[in-house]
């Protein structure tokens, strides 16, 4: 399982105002916020909510512009609060930003190419001018722009949509893992939003770049978002897939937001008689409980006691923080933080140096304002805020009974890892293969385009798979990434030759991409149907990326003059990959037979040494040895004139191979031999 890309745990940010002589006030912008963004595949995680809900604060925390009051942010296994200058520079390369204002991020005195020149100098991308130009062109092409059209222009000569896409091209040129997009389409014309959103989808699907998408526009969140977090005054009101949350909101606040979206029906009137408390009243009245209490039509006394936890809804990963659902199961806690390693010595030394400088500055400030401090101490603070200085990460909880059982248990070997194709979450709604219309074979590297008109319209394709080969799979609704009239995705699964499901597409996403490693050679079935709500799809495109490889040809073997007959050979058991098999052949009639389990398409390295592990024996002559395929043909032959033999073998079919050893072609025995078979490195 890939490690998480971004982990946020109990993130709290409090802004303070007032000085030594004034009243100290605080505003909680983010309160115990938790979020995880997976490492693969790339996703678009949406943070939505009204103004003042903490969206931009979260973005600034992830970008490292401001510091947490408490909590932790782990990116790719590294705590961003403990980074030294070198680590911070690497972090800036992996996490890029696209800001809300497409006008304010440019210097009007420089041409557009200056933006890319700064990036090249800061991150040392390339010293070769031609190579650097190709990098810029590639970045612009990804977002639908061309160098000759924009690079020599000034910012005021470009539209807002072009400026935002240039920011994405600049970010792509650095090849980040995450782009934090803070309201990237809020200040551009509606006609230009589609181009920016399509650029985000292309960066996610074709280049594996994840997005943290900050927005208050629920329509764009619904269109491109994978998961969505609905914030209210720094807390998570509801979270889940974008389609589940927006189609069926559960939290009263989210329901109000959805109801506020205008519909193209003049007879459907808004409720204009909405009375709202003042912002100050809303932020202070519910400081100890649910933040939405002053505005909630379903408020209860219990809501003032404590902030409600996230309760699980009907759909997977759909959770809402409201006591209306307290009879439901509480959502499980976020997984423990996954970190690569402790802080390096250089980072620790750098931090200690910075701490000494901070302490010295603090001493000067205290001495300079000693009188103010004394006066401040004589005043009673109106607000008491407790700041968590250190967070304890619990990686495992073990009961005394479990500990005792662990202490007395006999150690067992670790379980064998499952094949990559088996790690698939099967959807609740699976397509039945009966009644599917055959649409032919899918060719690697070519798009397969179709449409699904009704809930009963099912399409079946065949796909030739070779064991051990990995392919990239992409499914897009709308045909080649273009917007169709419906953004819902078809339900799709891939079946192995034995009928098991080895890959499942997420029907909640308009665009799906992933990898599949074939576990067996044979014909796979790709089945597509209407989504889990019975809606058809105007158009879909499914692509198997790459060129279909030819089966690896078997090595051409010239059989030796003297071939060992298998009749009369003594079975010696199985050969285990990576372990030495040591034996001796005493006479010309002494023949040893071993069995070797093989998987078609896999390659092994074979080593045969006379004398045992390469040490000199009393006789240096080599045994005659051959390897037979399950059909009886010779697929490998050792050179009996050499004391040491090495070679590589690629299995043509799955089954049991036979390794046969006997006296050399002069009938001489072998004092000792060692045969070792290991899996070749991929």
Image (cartoon, rainbow, N blue to C red):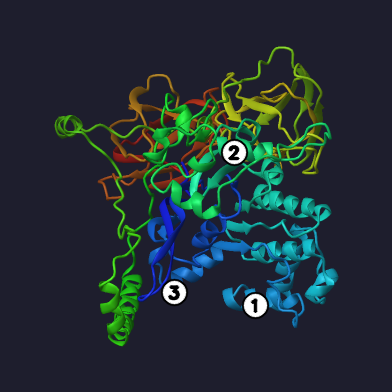
Q: Label 3, secondary structure: give it.
A: helix
Q: Are marks 3 and 2 in contact (CB under 8 Å)?
A: no
User: Residue 330 appears at what percent x and percent y?
Assistant: 41, 31
Rendering quarter of residue 456: top right
From the image, state whether disc 1 or disc 2 is nearer to you.
Answer: 2
Dot placed on the residue nearer the N-terminal end, 3 or 1: 3
Q: Is residue 666 rendered to the left or right of residue 89?
A: left
The residue depicted at 33 percent of the width and 39 percent of the height is 579
In the image, residue 100 above or below residue 248: below
Q: Is residue 563 visible?
A: no
Q: Label 1, secondary structure: give it.
A: helix
Rendering quarter of residue 127: bottom right
Rendering quarter of residue 555: top right
Residue toward you, 600 or 497: 497
Disc 1: which residue? 118
Residue toward you, 360 or 421: 360
The residue depicted at 80 percent of the width and 39 percent of the height is 479
Dot placed on the residue nearer the N-terminal end, 1 or 2: 1
User: Residue 3 appears at what percent x and percent y?
Assistant: 45, 47
Residue toward you, 561 or 466: 466
Disc 3: which residue? 85
In the image, residue 250 above or below residue 237: above
Disc 2: which residue? 254
User: Residue 395 appears at what percent x and percent y?
Assistant: 30, 45
User: What crowding class fits label 3: few (fewer than 14 Cα within 10 Å), some (14-19), or many (20 or more)?
Assistant: few
């Amino acid at each position: 399982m890939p490690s998480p890309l971004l982990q946020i745990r109990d993130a709290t940010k409090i802004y303070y105002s007032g000085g030594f002589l004034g009243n100290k006030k605080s505003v909680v912008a983010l309160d115990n916020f938790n979020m995880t963004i997976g490492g693969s595949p790339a996703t678009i995680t949406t943070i939505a909510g009204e103004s003042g809900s903490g969206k931009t604060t979260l973005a600034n925390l992830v970008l490292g512009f401001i510091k947490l009051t408490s909590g932790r942010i782990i990116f790719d296994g590294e705590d961003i609060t403990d980074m030294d200058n070198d680590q911070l520079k690497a972090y800036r390369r992996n996490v890029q930003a696209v800001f809300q204002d497409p006008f304010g991020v440019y210097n009007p005195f420089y041409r557009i190419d200056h933006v890319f020149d700064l990036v090249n100098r800061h991150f040392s991308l390339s010293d070769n001018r031609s190579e650097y130009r190709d990098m810029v062109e590639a970045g612009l092409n990804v977002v639908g722009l061309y160098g000759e059209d924009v690079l020599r222009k000034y910012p005021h000569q470009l539209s807002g949509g072009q400026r935002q896409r240039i920011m994405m091209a600049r970010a792509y040129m650095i090849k980040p893992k995450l782009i934090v997009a803070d309201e990237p389409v809020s200040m551009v014309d509606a006609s230009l939003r589609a181009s920016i959103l399509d650029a985000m989808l292309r960066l996610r699907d074709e280049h594996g770049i994840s997005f943290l998408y900050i927005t208050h526009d629920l329509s764009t969140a619904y269109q491109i978002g994978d998961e969505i977090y609905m914030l209210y005054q720094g807390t998570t009101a509801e979270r889940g897939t974008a389609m589940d949350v927006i189609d069926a909101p559960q939290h009263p606040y989210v329901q109000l937001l959805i109801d506020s979206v205008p519909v193209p029906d003049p007879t459907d009137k808004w409720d204009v008689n909405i009375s709202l408390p003042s912002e100050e009243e809303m932020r202070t009245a519910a400081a100890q409980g649910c933040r939405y209490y002053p505005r909630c039509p379903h408020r209860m006394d219990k809501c003032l006691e404590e902030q409600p936890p996230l309760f699980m809804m009907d759909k997977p990963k759909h959770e809402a923080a409201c006591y209306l659902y307290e009879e439901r199961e509480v959502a499980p806690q976020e997984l423990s933080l996954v970190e690569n390693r402790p802080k390096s010595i250089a980072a620790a030394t750098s931090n200690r140096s910075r701490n000494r400088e901070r302490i010295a500055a603090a001493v000067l400030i205290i001495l300079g304002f000693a009188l103010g401090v004394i006066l401040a101490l004589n005043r009673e603070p109106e607000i008491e805020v407790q700041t968590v200085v250190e967070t304890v990460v619990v990686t495992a909880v073990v009961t005394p009974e479990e500990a005792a059982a662990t202490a007395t248990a006999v150690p067992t070997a670790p379980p064998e890892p499952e094949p990559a194709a088996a790690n698939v979450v099967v959807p609740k709604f699976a397509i039945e293969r009966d009644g599917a219309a055959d649409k032919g074979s899918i060719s690697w590297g070519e798009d397969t385009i179709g449409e699904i008109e009704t809930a009963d319209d099912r399409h079946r394709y065949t796909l030739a798979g070779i064991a051990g080969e990995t392919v990239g799979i992409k499914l897009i609704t709308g045909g080649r990434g273009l917007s169709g009239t419906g953004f819902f995705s078809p339900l799709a699964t891939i079946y192995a030759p034995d009928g098991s499901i080895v890959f499942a597409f997420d029907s909640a996403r308009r665009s799906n991409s992933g990898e599949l490693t074939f576990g067996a050679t044979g014909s796979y079935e790709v089945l597509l149907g209407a989504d889990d709500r019975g809606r058809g799809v105007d158009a879909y495109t499914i692509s198997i990326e790459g060129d279909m490889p030819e089966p690896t040809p078997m090595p051409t073997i010239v059989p030796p003059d003297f071939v060992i007959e298998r009749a009369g050979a003594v079975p010696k058991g199985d050969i285990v990959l990576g372990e030495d098999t040591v034996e001796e052949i005493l006479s010309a009639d002494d023949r040893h037979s071993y069995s070797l389990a093989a998987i078609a398409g896999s390659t092994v390295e074979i080593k045969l040494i006379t004398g045992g592990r390469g040490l000199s024996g009393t006789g240096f002559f080599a045994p005659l040895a051959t390897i037979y395929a399950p059909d009886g043909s010779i697929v490998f032959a050792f050179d009996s004139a050499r004391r040491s033999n090495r070679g590589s073998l690629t299995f043509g079919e799955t089954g049991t191979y036979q390794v046969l050893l006997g006296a050399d072609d002069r009938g001489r025995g072998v004092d000792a031999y060692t045969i070792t078979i290991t899996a070749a490195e991929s």
